[in-house]
Image (cartoon, grey):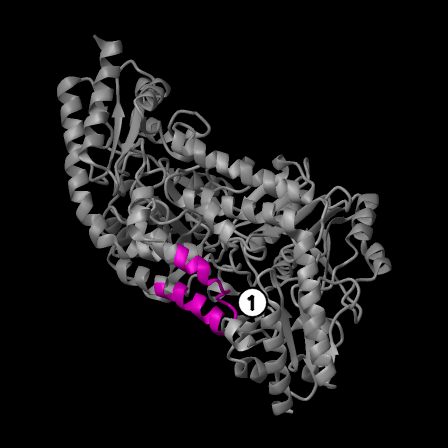
Amino acid sequence: MKLDFIKKMTKPDLIYLDYNATALIKPEVIELMSEVMKEGGNPSSVHGLGRLAKARMEEARSIIAEQINCRPQMIIFTSGGTEANNMAVLTCDRTRLITTNVEHDSIRSASSRFKGGVDHLSVDQDGLIDLGVLKELLEENGSSAIISILFANNETGVMQDVKKISAIAHEAGALLHIDAIQALTKVPIDFMELGADMMSLSSHKTGGPQGVGALITYEKLPVKSFVMGGGQEIGRRGGTENIAGIAGFGKAVSLIPQSLEKMKELESWRDEIERKLFEYAPASKFLGQNAKRLPNVSTIYMPNVTSETQVMNFDLDKICISSGSACSSGKVKSSHVIDAMSNDANIATSTIRMSLGWGSEHSDVRAFIKSWKKQYDRKNS
Amino acid sequence: MTEKTVKFPIYLDYQATTPIDERVLLAMMPYLTTNFGNPHSVEHSFGWQAEAAVEIARKNIATLIGASHGEIIFTSGATESNNLAIKGIVYAAYPKKNHIITVKSEHECVLASARSLENGGFDVTYLDVDEDGLIDMGALEAAITDKTSLVSVMAVNNEIGVIQNLKAIGDLCRDKGVIFHTDAAQAVGKIPLDVEELNIDVMSISGHKIYGPKGIGALYLRKNTPILSLIDGGGQENGLRSGTLSPALCAGIGKACAIAGEEMAKDYQHVTELSIRLLSKISAALNNVHFNGCRENRYPGNINLTFYGIKSDILVADLRDIAISTGSACSSAKHKPSYVLEAIGLNKQEIDASVRIGIGRMTTIEEIDHAADHIIKRVQYLL
């Protein structure tokens, strides 16, 4: 398929501002994937076609390794971020889990299955954990612990100070796993510099396809998937690999330099939204605004209008946003992330998430601001 | 003349993976491009379109196997389906029941799941197979106790193509109140399988073995079967399998199942004719060939042959224009001898002289003629 044709096809006729749920797949990714899907081949087969499939996969592995600064052997491809998060926490052979109360659902449910003690760190109103409390928790039995932290929050974009956390963790002999699913391609990621022992990634938040993710981990750690047999991924994750998906993931990651460049523009648009809404409605709030956060997302409180009503009205204006993470939005309950950051119950029930991405244009921003103001006026004037 | 019409290399490894049917690729494209949404975003139409695609795919799979769409769970592939079925059901039945039964010639991921249960303190019975590759029903019946929660027997073997007597196994398990799981990755879409008729409770399905994409599979789970999840999170797939689904991959496996439902008889006849053609050419030219596995109860697209007196890895490597394998793709990458051939009584020398040839929907007569010629010549040369 020709690239310009794909580009035309991928142009949505609605205004999509829900990139943290899933991003549009980049045309370059689709082009490569359709090529790879036509090639076929099982990467475990030793004949030519198998070797071609294997080469496609290993190419993606080296691209990702290079872009995030790890060795290719440290990448275990999975079916997605959820699987990576589950295996990191549940198979690492540690007896204590320290995590936060603003994690993604995949870590929240894994922690409920964790065999051993679990501590949940709370966050302040900016969404940040208290490093002093973490240190205290690690004073005793630190070396039996795994810490699992969301690098950039999926709802607010708030970023924890992973470098400091990893220094604290390693001083106490604890392992550190970070969920960098939302951060990848939005902020620079250098695995070695961050200092974590494990890191979860997902393709479909980056402009790659759904159904692919990865866990970055050191070979010496005992971590392996729940999906076993066949011996793929150096015996750490069984099953014929999703070659086209992995190739697409690799392509999306190879475009990180362009993505980060676009993020500068998105950040100025996001700041423009927050500035204009605040000028218009000083009672509005932007969660995590004072913390370091992802450049593309704003979590916005609109006084006196419930999240459900806002989502519906934005939809009538052909604008796609969400009231929280896609996983929990399917279940319609108030956000545990916002609850954790604020003790005002109204805020959690009247907040929506707007997230920009590589396909966003300034006209989308203007349409969003217009629709927001219209809804605000209906209830607040 | 055949030289001109044949495209090289000739792909005869359909058990390792199948090419994607072009119709499947077309069905997937809209969900990579315009309808790219997260199927779990219930708040806008991108999400709805994606969800609709997932649900249509679910119905297509259900229809193919005589199930209801609420009984289909999407997974990342048959390996995950097998892991989920075996571990999930056995964990759910514990501590009341702590025993499972499977077969020595199962796919590696079934055996790996069984071994991990064994390491966790569960009892596992590994049934033998006879020289045809079939289990003994009496032995199965004798192995079932009141502690048995699950019987897992694969439908079509991935190395030798033999089909177990699913109806008899299903009936026996139903009679004994034991859950029956079958790894049907090589069977779905190739032979008729009706979960009601065969009394199958749980069945693993693969996308890339039926001309669909890699990275997607499904698990049929009979309504009200107790099971625990392996991957938790957003609670997708009724809480049994968390993680964002790929609408493109779902649409792909769904379309592959829809096509299989319509064209199964045609495909089966095509594969049978080509299989007979290949075998008669080889057996007419060579007298050192042995056909492995039951002749009658088998899927004809999977041929496993022993060429006495040669080394099959050398044969496979020499046949540069033809993609065949010495065994399953999983084990061929690790150069381990086939435990399936060992289970049907072949000795080490015979195992090392065996190849698997896979025929499928896209295989042509010209390819078969060409491949037969080359294989025969090469075997004669190596002798």
Q: As drawn, is B330 to the left or to the right of A190?
A: right
Chain under label 1? Answer: B
Q: Is residue A176 visible?
A: no
Q: Residue at x 66, y 68 (%)?
A: B159
Q: Residues within 10 Å of mark 1 (few under 14, many from 20)?
A: many
| Residue at numbered disc 1 | B330
Q: As drawn, is A283 to the left or to the right of B275?
A: left
Numbered label tally: 1
| Residue B355, magenta (yes or no) | no
Magenta span: chief secondary structure: helix
Q: As drawn, is B6 to the left or to the right of A205?
A: right
| Residue A57, magenta (yes or no) | yes
Percent x, y for residue A10? 33, 42
Badge 1 element: helix
Q: Residue at x 41, y 33 (%)?
A: B47
Q: Give the magenta part as a residue range.
A: A34-59
